[in-house]
Structure formats: C-alpha cells, structure tokens
Amino acid sequence: MTLDTRALDRFLDDVASARVAPAGGTGAAVAAALGTALCEMVCVHTADASGGALADVRDDLRTERDHLRDLAAADAAVVDDLFAGGDTADDAGRKRATGVPLTTAEASLTVLELADDVTARGTPTAVADAVTGVLLVDAALRASLRTARHNLDRIADPAFVARVEERTAEIEARADDARDRAMGNAEGR
C-alpha cells in the first residue's frame, strides 16, 4: 500500500497558510481522530485474532472518530466566523469558539476511556499502535482544553466561565486517569 498524500498535503498547506482557519482547534480534532483510528485498527486486528472481541468498542470508536472529524470542520467554521467579526465579535461567537474545543476535549476523553479496554484486551502485537493513538488523543485533549481556557478570557458571562472552568478541570482529571490506565495496560503487554 502506498499513501496518497494529496489530501493530507492540501490540509497541511491550508493550516500553514495566511488564512486564519484551519488552525489549532482543527488540528487538535484531526489529531484526535487519527489517534482514534489507530485504536480502531487494534480492535480490527483483535477481532481477526479472537472472533470479534472488541467489535462493540470499535463501533464506539468509529462514532467518536466521525464526531471528531465533524468537530474539525466546526472549529474551522467558528474561527472563520469569529475573525470575520474582528474585534467586534460578540459573546455568542466567543462562546462557540470555547464550546467547540471543549466538545473536542470531551470526545477525546471518551476515546481515552475506550482505549483502556483496547490496550487491556487488544492483540499484543498491535497494542503499540493503540499507545500511539492514546498519546495523540491525549495531546489533542490537552490542546483543546488549553484553547477553551484561552477563549474564556474574553467572555463576559461569569456563569458560563465558571461552568467551563469546572468542566475543563473534570475532563482533565478523568483524562489523566484514563491515559494512565491505558498506558499501564500497554506496559505489561
């Protein structure tokens, strides 16, 4: 198999362009989707070896991968909309610019929690790919939380800010636990 790099090159060129989007949030969602796909692959190889042992996890991972792909597109649209307004962007636009990366972090958390099962039950020879997936998803989650927190600085609604701060702290704590479990599973394999 050879990798056709045209679509990937186009995406990377778009990120590296003078345009404001796609940017960090889009890149984080794409990285999380890639990590999710790696965990899915381990499920496929495990199913081949054990008759479907991780088919349910694979289905859930596919749902999250599709969600992350959609979030990548949503992030690019939100950034375009936000910058189209310049310094006159309203709180609603800023809240969307916070909500999309927060949702990306939530989807990434779901993947990390599923990866616990993948690294525990996956075919040992394929678990290294799940570890790569876990590391990509974890990095995307952290980047998404950072973006959400950064965007809070310009939101005037204290109740919204408090809810997002509470949610980001919860996601981060659960992510630490899920990542550590998944990586611990892989250590012994």
Image: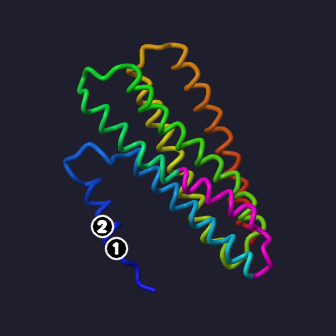
Mark 1 crowd level (few <14, some 14–19, many ≥20, 10 Å Cα)? few
Local SS, label 1 = loop
Whole-Å distance between the Cαs marked 2 and 1?
6 Å
Query: Between 110 and 132, which is closer to the camera in this rendering?
Result: 110
| Farthest-out residue, left | 18
Local SS, label 2 = helix
Query: Between 130 and 79, which is closer to the camera in this rendering?
Result: 79
- Quarter of the image containing the C terminus? bottom right
Query: Is residue 175 positioned above or below 11 on the image?
Result: above
In the rendered structure, the answer to whether residue 143 lies left or right of residue 131 reads left
Query: Is residue 119 positioned above or below 29 on the image?
Result: below
- The reply to whether callout 2 and callout 1 are in contact (CB within 8 Å) is yes
The structure residue drawn at horizontal position 60% and vertical position 58%, both measured from the top left corner, is 134
Quarter location, residue 13: bottom left
User: Residue 142's x, y, as percent?
Assistant: 52, 44
User: Residue 44's x, y, as percent?
Assistant: 67, 74
| Amino acid at circle 1 | Thr
Which numbered disc covers residue 9?
2
| Amino acid at circle 2 | Asp
Name the residue beneath numbered marker 1.
5
Which residue range is magenta in the image?
Answer: 49-67
Mark 2 crowd level (few <14, some 14–19, many ≥20, 10 Å Cα)? few
How many numbered dots are placed on residues in this image?
A: 2
40 within the magenta span = no
Question: What is the magenta segment's predominant secondary structure?
Answer: helix
In the rendered structure, the answer to whether residue 163 lies left or right of residue 21 reads right
